[in-house]
Image (cartoon, grey):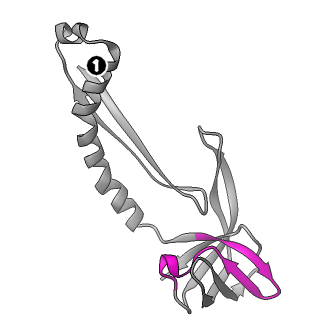
Amino acid sequence: IYGVSIAVNVIDIASKTLLVTNLEAEEFSMSLEDAEEQDEEAYVKKISIETFPEIIEEQVPVVERGLNAKHWTGRISAVENKTIMINAGKDVGLQQGNRFEVFTEGKSIPSGSGRTIYLFGANIGELKVTSVMEKHSLAESVSGGPFKAKQFIRFKP
């Protein structure tokens, strides 16, 4: 009997924060005689074909629930005078009047791949979208600040 596991980590590429992590495992058995008759590549392929579809099917609802429970996040792209550009627009369904909380970058965590993942820091204010383009939007301060490029934003329903 062998244990096969797949870990899924969903990372918000805008904020580089970990949104969902889940590990699912399945057991796979094969007689010793059958295992010895196959070369290593064929053996691994057989295990993968037998276990991966079920494991992945178990991952889907977990990831879906995790993503649905999170508010949309992004980043401030630029700040000029009192106009704040954010990295989302019509492409993600933003509308004029939408509001966002703004956060500083918090602690950083190095990932296994060498990328740095940042946690949200302190809540420093709120923005309101004033103009929406295809892939970015302009906003103004409702409260707080100072606002700078690369700060995180989180949709406020």
Q: Amino acid at mark 1?
A: Tyr
**What residue sits right under mark 1 in the picture?**
43
Magenta run includes residue 92: yes
Instruction: Give the magenta-colored segment's residue range.
Output: 74-94
Residue 106 sits in quarter? bottom right
**Viewer-side residue, 27 vs 33:** 33
Report the residue at 26% width, 48% height from top.
57
How far from the left and from the top, in percent, is residue 6?
37, 38
**Outermost right residue:** 81
Report the residue at 57% width, 58% height from top.
13
How far from the left and from the top, in percent, is residue 126?
64, 83
Horizontal arrangement in the rendering, residue 38 relative to residue 109 (left or right): left
**Viewer-side residue, 39 vs 20:** 39
Above or below, 7 against 145 in this view is above
How far from the left and from the top, in percent, is residue 62?
33, 54
State which quarter of the image contains the N terminus.
top left
